[in-house]
Image (spheres, rainbow, N blue to C red):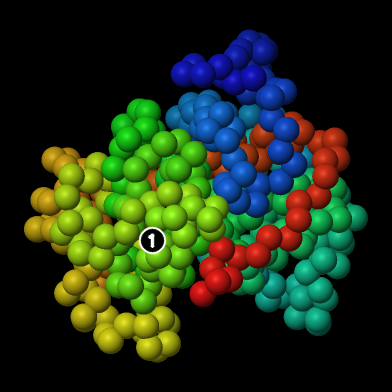
Amino acid sequence: MVRQGAGPEVTNSHSPILREVPPAAPDWKRRHVLDLDDFSRDEIEMVLDTAEAMREILGREIRRVPSLRGVTVVTLFYEASTRPRASFELAGKILGADVINLSAGGSSVEKGETLVDTVRTLQAIGADVVVMRHSSSGAPYLAARDLDAAIVNAGDGLHAHPTQALLDIFTLRSHLGDLRGKRIAIVGDVLHSRVARSDLWGLAAVGADVVLCGPPTLLPAVYLRPEGDRDRAKLPHARVELDLNRALQGADVVMTLRLQAERQRGGLLPSLREYSRLYEITEARLTRAAPNALVMHPGPMNEGVEIAPAVAHGSQSLVEEQVKNGVAIRMALLYLLSSRRPPAPAPKVKAAMLADR
Ligand code: CP
């Protein structure tokens, strides 16, 4: 088990490469990471504590440990990505894994191979961990159903992006410590945001107080219903505030979301100009939040639409730190999943959270 608040244990002091390999994590029971909806607070803390040890490795002169030597990690991306794709590859390489990168273009998917056959093929060639991004909600659950390889969801449709949520919570814990009772305003296109959904589950598990804000057409309908109705939907608790100034009032953290321009064509927004007039996080609006409130964005950003450039790159912004911490979190997940190899019951395919819309 990685010791809380301390660097990894020294296991071999003779070799500069072999020293300080993170020790095993016997308490880790999970076979896949598909979403945070069934993560306990303790499990999230275990990932964050392991990431803390990984961050120490990232600060060394030689960023290499052999913890995952002999482990094969495949990144399988059916959708564009910069951050998760690059950071999973780097995470695997720093830990000594063999890393294979595949995208739908240029693979046999172009010849019509199914998702399950593709993942079975990867398992047959020895993949231990498959990191997957897919435009269809639920695709990683399908892949995880009959396979021994560990599946990590790097974003599926509108549904979930658990590794982004873990790196967000890790970044916030580094600045704020215990997140219980901390006020987090999530602003923007919550409806189409898999990041927001996973953050909601994760932030609820660690006890944060979340306020959702955006145009009603871009908020999940279930959050616009009375609180009792929401409880029955078994969704994480969050308050809704349609007025941005009220949502920002006293917030410790302002998390803005990418406005997906394609939504405007779907008739959900009158115009981008109208959106930014009402919901863009500007320096003036940020003064409504708590003094020195932290600003986050999962990226990629539309500067001048959901976030002003001065805020995106200002002293309160954690955007670059989020990206940096993504490597430590993904190292931690690859490490923990590789430490737990025996089979466990396969997950049920889960309906997307917005099925009622
Ligand atoms: N935050 C995130 O997942 O972004 P990209 O995949 O677009 O890099």
Residue 338: quadrant of the picture:
top right
* In the image, farthest residue toward the right: 124
Q: Is the residue at mark 1 in contact range of ligand 1, meaning its CB lies under 8 Å from it?
A: no
Instruction: Point out the image quarter for the N terminus.
Output: top right
Is residue 120 or residue 46 the one in the foreground? 46
Q: Looking at the picture, tell me which residue is in the foreground, 247 or 129.
A: 247
Q: Residue at x 77, y 76 (%)?
A: 109
Q: Say above or below: 148 vs 26.
A: below
Please state which of residues 133 and 221 is positioned toward the viewer in this rendering: 221
The image shows residue 200 at horizontal and vertical percentages of 45, 51
Picture coordinates of residue 234, whole percent (x, y): 55, 53
Badge 1 crowding class, 10 Å Cα cut-off, few under 14, some 14 to 19, many 20 or more, is: few
Residue 231 location (% of width, % of height): 49, 53
Q: How many numbered marks appear?
A: 1
Q: Specify whether residue 62 is in view.
A: no
What residue do we see at 73% from left, 60% from top? 349
302 versus 2 height, above or below? below
User: Which residue is painted at 53% across and 33% down in the image?
Assistant: 41
Left/right placement of residue 122 relative to residue 301 reads right
Badge 1 amino acid: Pro
Residue 184 in view (yes/no): yes
Q: Which residue is mark 1?
A: 226
Label 1: which secondary element: loop
Q: Residue furthest front?
A: 228
Residue at (66%, 40%) from the top-left corner?
A: 334
x and y percentages locating residue 9 in the rendered image = 60, 14
Horizontal placement of 128 versus 190: left or right? right
Q: Where is residue 104, by image quadrant?
A: bottom right
Q: Is residue 321 left or right of residue 47?
A: left
